[in-house]
Amino acid sequence: MARIRLDHIRHAYTPELARAGNFALNNIDTAFEDGGAYALLGPSGCGKTTLLNIISGLLTPSEGHVYFDRTDVTLLTPEARNIAQVFQFPVIYDTMTVAENLAFPLKNRKVEAREIERRVADMLKRIGLADKAGRKARGLTADEKQKISLGRGLVRSDVNAILFDEPLTVIDPHMKWQLRSELKQLHREFEMTMVYVTHDQTEALTFADKVVVMYDGEVVQIGTPEELFERPQHTFVGYFIGSPGMNVLPCRIEGGEAIVAGERVALPGHSGERRSEKTELGIRPEFVGVVERGQPGAMPVTIEKVEDIGSERIVRARLGGERVTAIVREGASVPGDAAVTFDPNALNLYENSRLVARSGG
Ligand code: ATP
């Protein structure tokens, strides 16, 4: 396995797009540590697949370098990089049996026959296909084919990294959980460097030790699931991680307070005046309280909707011209004459979408 480093990567798909400044990836300067399980998470079109293909060698970046440990692999083919890949739509050999499909990459690498047999049998159990070992792949379901594809990537233990591009899209929902935990287990056992592309936050947060959040061709934050939740470095991360996401409220800063929709919110630990083009206050719905009007510091709102979701209620309200969402516990009353409070220890201040201060340090 290897540490993968992306050094000042930019990519435009054509010279015309480059001339127009239209880059699918911009300023990617990041590293995937040896043995880490990473998820590349972001909305459709943000550049995840482009980045994965640059790591694998299917694509050469317009600018920048890719290193596996200290070796510059930017111009090397995928084969020369020695990586395994699992794609969204499985590429499998229909005329071979399930077991032969799994054995194929090992035979290619001249692994000894006994060892192939052992590893294939182990992998068949892990992916739940032991009873279909001798079946031709042709007649299998899409689900089963994707499991073969996963197994074929994972059966090789000598690779520099394993790259997954939305591998569970075609998998049945209840099987997704099983395969995801199997992937995690394999990662723990073999400490493989894994990079896993997804636009599904649950998938990213359950699979990865570190999540790389991408937005509009850039990496906006790399962090553990907790860090992304507690310390979103970019408004997009706050909004994208969490359900519902962070409230991002345009504001002005005056004398250590944020003015949000005409209301004053104290910013503990924040003194300076700031005058960027765009200043926003971020607060997660979990830290917004819903109370009766008239309480000190409470800001009057109009309630638009209350949704009961099991053990919690999601309250959607309007504070002046801004929408504010709160999550309160099941059964909590939502007064007709409502107001909201913001937990003073959970405030994040953003300038031009980047975190510049947070209460509590
Ligand atoms: P998805 O989740 O939908 O697969 P993604 O995050 O993987 O999206 P990419 O497929 O990497 O995003 O695309 C990044 C940007 O590059 C998008 O604007 C896309 O339209 C553009 N793009 C992707 N492939 C090509 C191509 N072959 N030619 C031109 N532009 C492309």
Image (cartoon, rainbow, N blue to C red):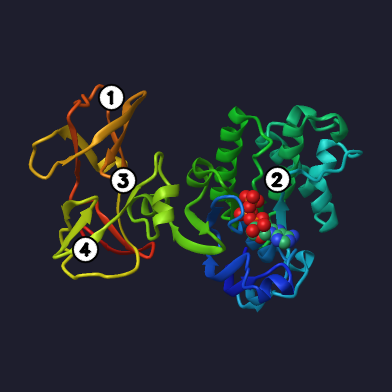
Please tell me which residue lies in front, 171 or 316. Answer: 316
Instruction: Determine whether, in the image, residue 37 is placed left or right of residue 252.
Output: right
Give amino acid for label 3: Glu
Task: Name which of mark 4 and mark 1 comes first in the sequence.
Answer: 4
**Mark toward the viewer: 4 or 2:** 4
CA separation, marks 3 and 2? 39 Å
Compute the Cα span from label 1 to label 2.
39 Å
The label shown at residue 253 is 4
The quarter of the rendering in which ligand 1 is drawn is: bottom right
Q: Is mark 4 within 8 Å of ligand 1?
A: no
- On-image quarter of the N terminus: bottom right
Number of other residues with Cα within 10 Å of mark 4, as a class: few under 14, some 14 to 19, many 20 or more: many
In the rendered structure, find residue 322 and report the number of the disc placed on it. 3
Q: How far is the residue under mark 4 from the one under mark 2?
A: 46 Å
**Quarter of the image containing the C terminus?**
bottom left
Disc 1 target residue:
330
Q: Position of residue 140 (x, y in %)?
A: 81, 30
Whether residue 191 is visible, yes or no, is yes
Marked residue nearer the N-terminal end (3 or 1):
3
- Judging by the rendered image, the residue that carries numbered circle 2 is 88
Three-letter amino acid code of the residue under disc 2: Gln
Of tags 3 and 2, the one toward the viewer is: 3
Kindly indicate whether the residue at mark 2 contacts the one at mark 3 (C-beta within 8 angstroms): no
